[in-house]
């Protein structure tokens, strides 16, 4: 698995990436939800 953002590239073992993605999925959902809620308040 090759992942990149701006000037950074990471090479991950696919099994480790899948484990990481599974463990962090909910925290990313929480962050997105909070951003969405804040955007709604600014309107």
Image: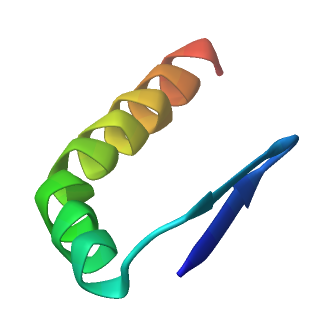
Give the quadrant of residue 39: top right
Labels in figure, total? 0
- Looking at the image, is 24 positioned above or below residue 1? above
The percent position of residue 37, horizontal first and vertical second, equals 40, 30
Q: Is residue 19 left or right of residue 33?
A: left
Residue 22: % across, % down: 17, 69
In the image, 3 versus 42, the foreground residue is 3
* Residue 3 against residue 24 in the figure, above or below: below
Residue lying at the far right in this picture: please name it.
7
Q: Residue furthest top?
A: 42
**Of residues 24 and 19, which is closer to you in this image?**
19
12 with respect to 31 (left or right): right
Q: Which percent across, then down, holds residue 32?
A: 41, 43
Q: Position of residue 7 (x, y in %)?
A: 87, 41
The vertical placement of 32 against 17, above or below, is above
10 or 6, which lies in front?
A: 10
Residue at figure coordinates x 47%, y 30% from the top left: 35
- Please give left or right for residue 43 compared with residue 39 in the image: right
Residue at the image position 26 percent from the left and 78 percent from the top: 18
Residue 15 vs 23, above or below: the answer is: below
The quadrant of the rendering that contains the C terminus is: top right
Residue located at (16% from left, 71% from top): 19
């Amino acid at each position: 698995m090759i992942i990149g953002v701006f000037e950074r590239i990471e090479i991950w073992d696919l099994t480790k990436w899948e484990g990481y993605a599974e463990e962090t999925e909910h925290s990313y959902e929480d962050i997105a939800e909070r951003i969405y809620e804040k955007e709604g308040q600014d309107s």
